[in-house]
Image (tube, rainbow, N blue to C red):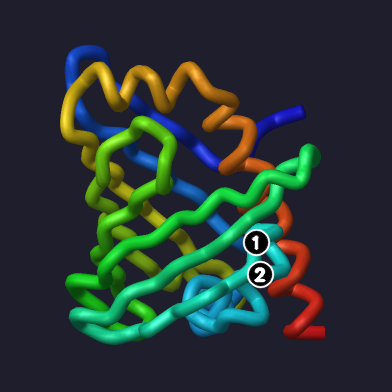
Amino acid sequence: MERKTQVHAEDGKQEIFITREFELPLDLLFKAYVQPEIVEQWMGTKVLKLENHKHGSYQFETTDPKGNKHRFNGTIHEFEPELKITRTFEMENSGFPVQLEFLEFESISEGKSRLRMQMVFKSVGDRDRMLQLPFRQGINMAHDRLQKVTQNLNS
């Protein structure tokens, strides 16, 4: 099965580039990233805090199959509705340092939009450790759920 989310990581660089086109209008794609009830559905996580503005912050919590809780958090540095979000991202107690994420939202047509993400890691080694996890599969599955959940809001 083809993965619709494209992940590109150039050898020797500290970045991961992610691109996905959605069969969604731009406003719905953006809502999927900023409305807690939608985020919870497609990410499969509990939103503890989501302050969508410059200098805002967020905190999410998920529970693994063994019942262990894992938290993710960050600070929002830029927030331009339906255009971009720049934020940090930290997986608490994971051994991974904080990373920087640039999310750019673009309208392709009335019912189609694109998300471009650039993730910057502290080191090439940290980036490579992330790629050793089922990262590509996980983000593709999450984006598939985002498409389905958000598309249902539009119908």
Gap in angstroms between the C-alphas marked 2 and 1: 5 Å
Mark 2 in CB contact with mark 1 (< 8 angstroms): yes
Find residue 92 and report its horizontal and vertical position in percent.
41, 47
* Image position of 151 with respect to 95: above or below: below
**What's under tag 2, amino acid-wise?**
Glu
Q: Quadrant of residue 29?
A: bottom right
The one nearer the camera, 112 or 155, is 155
* Quadrant in which the N terminus is drawn: top right
* Closer-to-camera residue (86/48): 48
Point out which mark residue 40 bears: 2
Query: Residue 59: image x %, image y %?
Result: 45, 68
Q: Looking at the image, is 62 positioned above or below residue 83? A: above
Judge whether residue 143 can be spotted in this image.
yes
The picture places residue 70, in percent across and down from the top left corner, at 56, 49
Q: Secondary structure at mark 2?
A: helix
Looking at the picture, how far across and down is residue 55, in whole percent? 19, 80
Which residue is depicted at the point 34% across and 18% down?
128
Q: Give whichever of 155, 39 is nearer the camera.
A: 39
